[in-house]
Amino acid sequence: MTDTRATALGTTPDSPASRRRAMLWQMVDDYSLILIFVALFVVLSATVQYFFSWDNMAGLLLSVSQIGMVACTMMFCLASRDFDLSVGSTVAFAGVFCAIVANATGSVVVGVLAALVAGALVGLVNGAVIAKLRINALITTLATMEIVRGLAFISSHGQAVGVSNEAFFALGSASVAGLSVPVWITLGCFALFGVLLNKTIYGRNTLAIGGNPDAARLAGVAVDRVRIAIFLIQGLVAALAGVILASRMTSGQPNAGQGFELNVISACVLGGVSLMGGRATISGVIVGVLIMGTVQNAMSLMNIDAFYQYVVRGTILLIAVLVDQLKNRRQAR
Amino acid sequence: MTDTRATALGTTPDSPASRRRAMLWQMVDDYSLILIFVALFVVLSATVQYFFSWDNMAGLLLSVSQIGMVACTMMFCLASRDFDLSVGSTVAFAGVFCAIVANATGSVVVGVLAALVAGALVGLVNGAVIAKLRINALITTLATMEIVRGLAFISSHGQAVGVSNEAFFALGSASVAGLSVPVWITLGCFALFGVLLNKTIYGRNTLAIGGNPDAARLAGVAVDRVRIAIFLIQGLVAALAGVILASRMTSGQPNAGQGFELNVISACVLGGVSLMGGRATISGVIVGVLIMGTVQNAMSLMNIDAFYQYVVRGTILLIAVLVDQLKNRRQAR
Amino acid sequence: MHSAPRLAFRHIGKRFPGVRALDDVGFSVRAGSVHGLLGENGAGKSTMMKILGGEYVPDDGEVAIDGQAVAFRGAADAIAAGVAVIHQELQYVPELSVMENLLLGRLPTRLGLVDRRRALAFVRDRLDALGVDLDPRAKLKQLSIGQRQMVEIVKAILRDATILALDEPTSSLSHRETEVLFRLVRDLRAQGKAMIYISHRLDEIFALCDAATIFRDGRKVADFDTLQGVSRETLVQRMVGRDIGDIWGYRPREHGPVRLSVQGVTSRAVPLPASFQVRAGEIVGFFGLVGAGRSELMRAVYGADRRLSGEVSVDGKAVRPTHIRDAIRLGLVFCPEDRKEDGIIGVRSVSENINISARRNHLVAGLFVNDRVEARTADTYIERLRIRTPNRRQEIRLLSGGNQQKAVLSRWLAEKNLRVLIVDEPTRGIDVGAKNEIYAVLYELAARGVAVVMISSELPEVLGVSDRVIAMSRGRIVAQFARGEASEERVLAAALPEGAAPSARQVTP
Amino acid sequence: SSGSNDQVKIGFVVKQPEEPWFQDEWKYAEQAAKEKGFTLVKIGAPDGGQVLTAIDNLKSQHAQGFIICTPDVKLGPSIVAKAKADGLKLMTVDDRLVDGAGQPLASVPHMGISATKIGEQVGQAIADEMKKRGWKPEDTGALRIAYDQLPTAKERTDGAVDALTAAGFPKANIVNAPEAKTDTENAFNAANIAITQNPTYKHWVAFGLNDEAVLGAVRAAEGRGFRASDMIGVGIGGSQSALNEFAKPEATGFFGSVLISPKRHGYETSINMYEWIKNGKAPPALTLTTGQLITRDNAAQVRKDMGL
Ligand SMILES: Nc1ncnc2c1ncn2[C@@H]1O[C@H](COP(=O)(O)OP(=O)(O)OP(=O)(O)O)[C@@H](O)[C@H]1O
Ligand SMILES: Nc1ncnc2c1ncn2[C@@H]1O[C@H](COP(=O)(O)OP(=O)(O)OP(=O)(O)O)[C@@H](O)[C@H]1O
Ligand SMILES: [Mg+2]
Ligand SMILES: [Mg+2]
């Protein structure tokens, strides 16, 4: 509580040298995770064959594209002190639903739109139940996670739904300027949600709600509406991720995206988004997503045994947050 | 000084009738979830064939015995505002490890002890990292979840490890007074941890830490030590659950307990344990566990299609917390 | 000055489970006036303000603005009607900047994006015009409590509300900040705003208010159209229902050997080594301006902050640097100033909050909590300090601010083996009657041989209660005064950073 | 992983890397790699997205071809397209890819046994053993430990049902016991409830997607008093779970398991792929293997014959 007061107040006169030092540390603090990632990246490039190649980079980006998209909206969700476990199911359901509708109507566009609307609807239900009925977000989204997964199975009879229209596959496999469409969409999401978070009322209100919901409410922020919007958009983006995944796989699969939600949340938390709300940066989330993807990618390249991959993944996760934590120790009383 | 008593009590005297009404409501509030469960139970008994039979009750209890045990310690974990995702992996690892050690030493007792020590160790690591290094509990236990699962696979080469010593199987299948040993152990856990939570300094300190860790520390609570103890005991109990599971299945299986952690946490939250810490009751947790088990049991008895089970499970979860929530709405404003 | 009331409360009633917070209460406030609202802790003042702010819906009665009944269904309604309430419990977003907190809910935009430049310029302008010195870009969590409180006040003012309610705004303000606030309030009055001002400091009421209403136990007990000619004693009498003769009630005591010895203590927040001693039976008052470093010094003494160097001992036994439990076991306890962050455990009961530390002394078999003893302890202090709660099982967050403070204080009074008691702003937000009780408790402890350290920002309180006064300034102990030598001028002169011109705050409860 | 570009590098992608079966496949593929001196890259890909990532990853490492057991056969067209785009040779093992219309993709060389076939073998084994024990079908219940969320699992259990009914087992006596997850404990709970629901049967038979499912059913039946003489459980895989049962001093209700040779699947496919890359010798378009029933009596012998 007391740590940084002096700096902000500027009442204790600092020497220019110590000020510069403080600013440097501040920068290291703010970007420590990025530095960790850069270090990791450099080490891997130097030691792992094929790691630093265009093919591999393109593949790496593609592999995190779904997680990356949804991490953007999950960032909002966590920043407002909420939680969403239903995204993995939404990914699956949207893919299946898109395929079914596209097959039935013969139109890919209609299929995609239907899936997006369905995803937004799932999000709307989540948001309405959580904000209006005031039910714990964990339980609510756990429930919708089950329900939506069930819907995915029911509507597909548990089978993958292939799409006959070839146009559909372009979404997932076409490539623009050397990167595939899903990667571009993910980059777009990073940019869009970065601006949303930092530059718009919506983003600032989200942070305010997460930082202190009462204060936000008392200041006249339409707390319920913002929370519902957050979930709605999350549902929409999860559906988009699902559609893209289905397009990449040329079929909608009802058991896709299992464990997706934990990956997304981990990426966010790794990226410094506070589960207690109020704190989030898009750069952190991007790095979080990249670290997760890079570790997995490098392990595959290094041909690490499947069983040992668990151990390595866990250890790296721990080390990354640990190093990131060191700054807080330095700051602590 | 005449008005001291009145001020101290702070209440304007109410009529006896309204007092009685208030007390009744208070009771309904305190036990609303229990009432929901009783209602559910009665309805199911009346409508679902075989539901209310000794065989089925014994089976139901057995089916929730592992979740029940670990829910007790998870209650402490959540009550202190922490979180543990590693329990499922610990269950698997303890089962495998117990089998390996028992086979190697020829002694079941040594095997069980080794597994319990290993579980406690996992918990200790969790606790130490979270309390001392101040790393977010979600990330820490996600990491140990991966690592410990990896260890389970590595030590067993991914294969089920059979135990040759028949004595081992008694733990899981022997039956005392009509109920099997795992059920008795679970009941013992409910009693033990209920007393621990409500009647001991350990439990009260846990709740205080969850309510406000800073204040608890300044009030002389050994916050770090209590948090470490909570995780350590949780590891121990998860290992016990794993050993019992292995005994029931007559082999330690490295892929046991997947998704176990979410089930346990849901049972707790359903039972009114606050994720914000500071609030927990053992009766709530018991009911939470029972509701989860009962719903699953009844759905199977009713031969509900596997795909629809997802939907039903999610819906019931939602309804249960919703009804429980109504009391808060009544109190609000 | 005989305009119709801008704001009127009519027959307001409000119940909570087990508590009747307000019972048929009404009063009215004229435009261009400041209306004082007084009452004991838990009298219902804050509840009334929450009704005004749209947070609570009254069970009975109504609020009227310009004679027109209004029914607020949320904070947004109240804001739209031109009402701004500054709450007793500060409501800010720690991670956001001063600017964003000030404009929360109404940030200016350009092309859909927040126009930071314009917002900053606007806020800077207004802050300058108001004469408030705050950096609009600093995050709230970087500010002192007093500065956060200033942000709250400015936030309300910036809304250009016509009705303004201030619920204990000065409880954490420095002397200078208080003067700024007074000036702001007087300006606003001149602009014709209707204001409600809640404070337990009667001199503030006399200095600012044109009229006043007194609550007791959720009922209105007195209305004053004017405070001209009304005496302090009258107000106190109506508030607490009895006469409080000499508020300090000080009696000289014998002092024993040195109990607490602090030698060259430093911590991250206390860079310069500090030393002092307190004898058994002695009450030492620490005075300083806000930010003088008193709290930080005591946190280091207690072990709440890591001590970097220096020795602390109680009766000659050393207290280890980071071991709070060590300190408590040796009888050294510390009651922190920030009630909400460091004091209460909100979702736990009053009894839990009182017993959390002392319970280790009466465990059964070293593990089991002795509920009977704890209930007795809790009830004792609830009665002794007149903590207004339906029962000891009530969650402490549901108590009024002052009553929470009393419960936290009880936690330390309940320590059996108490040898050194350090209290940081013990009477912040506490009513006159309860202050009197707390002083009595301090004397009683001192008489039993406890060494007492009291940090307070209210000079008269320090002078009235202490056997010895220590002045701090800029993180250093700068002067000591025996009771006889300490006068307002001398202590203040010592506490002020050199150069600053003193204008003593005339605070007597 | 070192080597120049002319060195052969082969990927082996499987859907459930933790499963003993796939571990074994990898083990024997590794053996082939050692013999022939090529590099084997083992990647687990439990869902469609990860399959595509795995293929990209192989391309980055300059592999020339890969063998895959896909998590879903309907991924066929996208896997084929991806392999073509990345210039990788493609073979499938265990599960055969299908096109959008559900027809097998004949263009992709395949080695395996259809899930339905294995299921039928299980059903047949159960029917035979019932006949041997002289059980009346009316008195016997059949536990179908179902996990229909997984297409392969559904095909296997459906195959068993087909074979059983073809052998004269009454369809009405087949009890569906859906498990929530594919581990033993969940199979146990599913079976336990199914037994409760059908108190009239004197004997039980059980089948499921793997040995673990059947093991759970056997344990549940034991808990309800159905001992080895009243229970016939036949699993799939011949995994350690099954061998553990056979190793017990007393026979249990776990009667047998249909063993498929991971050696052929792992070793032969790798050799074929190596030949294809190195010498341009295309593998046979379709190699169908068969499973073999192992029981307490013949397990050791059969495994030895298979070179396990
Ligand atoms: N949400 C609530 N639930 C239950 N009781 C409440 C609630 N809010 C307030 N109370 C009770 O209502 C009474 C009035 O409280 P209020 O906060 O209005 O007092 P106050 O006059 O502002 O006191 P203080 O001077 O200590 O701030 C108190 O007894 C308090 O415990
Ligand atoms: N208004 C301020 N101006 C400058 N520094 C401040 C201010 N407020 C807090 N600080 C910083 O915090 C430290 C002490 O803060 P704190 O306000 O707790 O002191 P204090 O003497 O205990 O005053 P109080 O108890 O009245 O708040 C100071 O040493 C200073 O670095
Ligand atoms: Mg108040
Ligand atoms: Mg202070």
Image (cartoon, coloured by chain):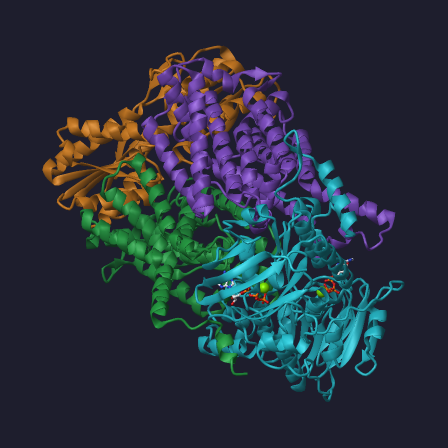
Chain colours: A purple, B green, C cyan, D orange
Residue that protrudes farthest toward the front in the picture: C2
Image point (59%, 16%), residue name = A176
Specify the quadrant that holds the C terminus of chain C.
Answer: bottom right
> Is D58 located above or below residue A197 in the figure?
above
Horizontal and vertical percent position of residue C487: 82, 77
Quadrant hosting residue B273? bottom left
Quadrant hosting residue D271? top left
Horizontal and vertical percent position of residue D129: 17, 35
Ligand 3's quadrant: bottom right
Which of C338 and A71 lies nearest the eye of the viewer?
A: C338
Which of A99 and A307 lies nearest the eye of the viewer?
A: A99
Horizontal and vertical percent position of residue C251: 71, 87
Horizontal and vertical percent position of residue C480: 82, 76
Quadrant hosting residue B191? bottom left
Left or right: residue B251 compared with residue C268: left
Residue that protrudes farthest toward the bottom in the picture: C254
Image point (85%, 53%), residue name = A13
Left or right: residue A194 compared with residue D199: right
